[in-house]
Image: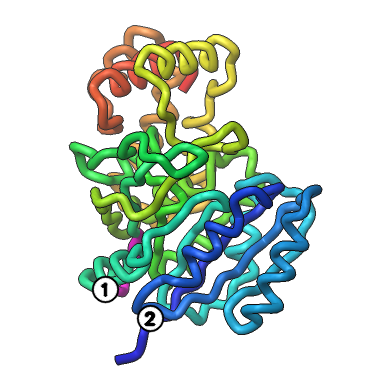
Amino acid sequence: MNKSKVCIMLSTYNGVKYIDEQIESLLVQQQVDVQINIRDDGSSDETVQKLRDYVKFHPDQIRVIEGENLGVIGSFFELMRQMEPVYDFYAFCDQDDVWKQDKLIRAVTKLKSRQSNVPLMYCSSTQMVDQDLNHINVWPTLPPKALSMYNAMVENCCVGCTIVINPVAFQQVRASIPSDLTQVIMHDWWIYLYVSAFGEVIFDEEPMILYRQHQNNVLGGSSEGWIAKWKNRWSRFVNGKNHFILSKQAKMFLHLNKDQLSAQQLKDIQSFLNQLDSPWIKRIKYAFQMPFYRHASLDNLVLKLIYVLKKV
């Protein structure tokens, strides 16, 4: 039986410290053929030299694009633009984790069990670890509610470095990448939003990667306590860091995909955006009746609060 061909898209930036462990874990993936496509996002350390060495030893499996600094969102979307649509599946990868050897075949098997003519996306829990790969905890846990557009519009529960998508999802997402990336919160969130709206998202509660937590993480799951997490969130809110990010992304998503959305989806997204301009009494009423939701009860309450405050 032919092995599935999987395109791994890895973006690097000053990642020399952990890149060996990451790439080695990709090269030993079981029961799939992997092509590792790496885009360096303008590193100033020894990352590029290390990547060139890997290409010498694995010229048929590893390809490196040496690019200018675009930031994490721009770098991953540029990787998607540069990939040929010739693979069976497409996976996203960070520079500092370690993948279990059966990560890809597990994702591929689950994706193959669904109908293949719609956008499909696999994501999983992660085993969070410290710099030395000592286990911390599993995150995120299995979401209690559906992984639908009504969640994805207001929350991302899919960790980018666990995502694997089918060719339909790859080609459709690639065709709908916004020209203005300031309207996108994160590349993985955008992909989750797209696939949940037009296809199916599969969440695997078995952690398939060791997700390293360290000082240089650009983004990532947090091992901090409940109080610290909410203090940080409050600080970001007060400083205005996360104001309007949900509504900006929703507007862009609506603009690019209005012709493909169902009548109900279209109506619901438009209501979400339009009710923000209503008097506060109407905003309160809408906030507590809206179909959009976060998984945790407290997070859901916060969503309603920031909606009423017009900061969503």
Q: Residue at left 58%, top 64%?
A: 80
Q: Circle 1 — which element?
A: helix
Residue interval drawn in magenta: 116-121
Whether residue 105 sits left or right of residue 221 in the image: it is left
57 over 217 or under it: above or below: below
Which percent across, then down, holds residue 196?
A: 33, 51
Which percent across, then down, holds residue 35?
A: 53, 76
Which of the labelled discs sits on residue 112, or is there none? 1
Residue 251: tell me if it is visible. Answer: no
Q: Residue at left 40%, top 54%?
A: 162
Q: Residue furthest bottom?
A: 1
Residue 182: tell me if it is visible. Answer: yes
- Closest to the camera, between mark 1 and mark 2, is 2
Residue beneath disc 2: 4
The quadrant in which residue 153 appears is: top left
Which percent across, then down, holds residue 142?
A: 23, 42
Q: Circle 2 — which element?
A: strand
**Which secondary structure is most common in the magenta stretch?**
loop
Q: Residues within 10 Å of mark 1 (few under 14, many from 20)?
A: few
Which percent across, then down, holds residue 257?
A: 46, 53
130 over 118 or under it: above or below: above
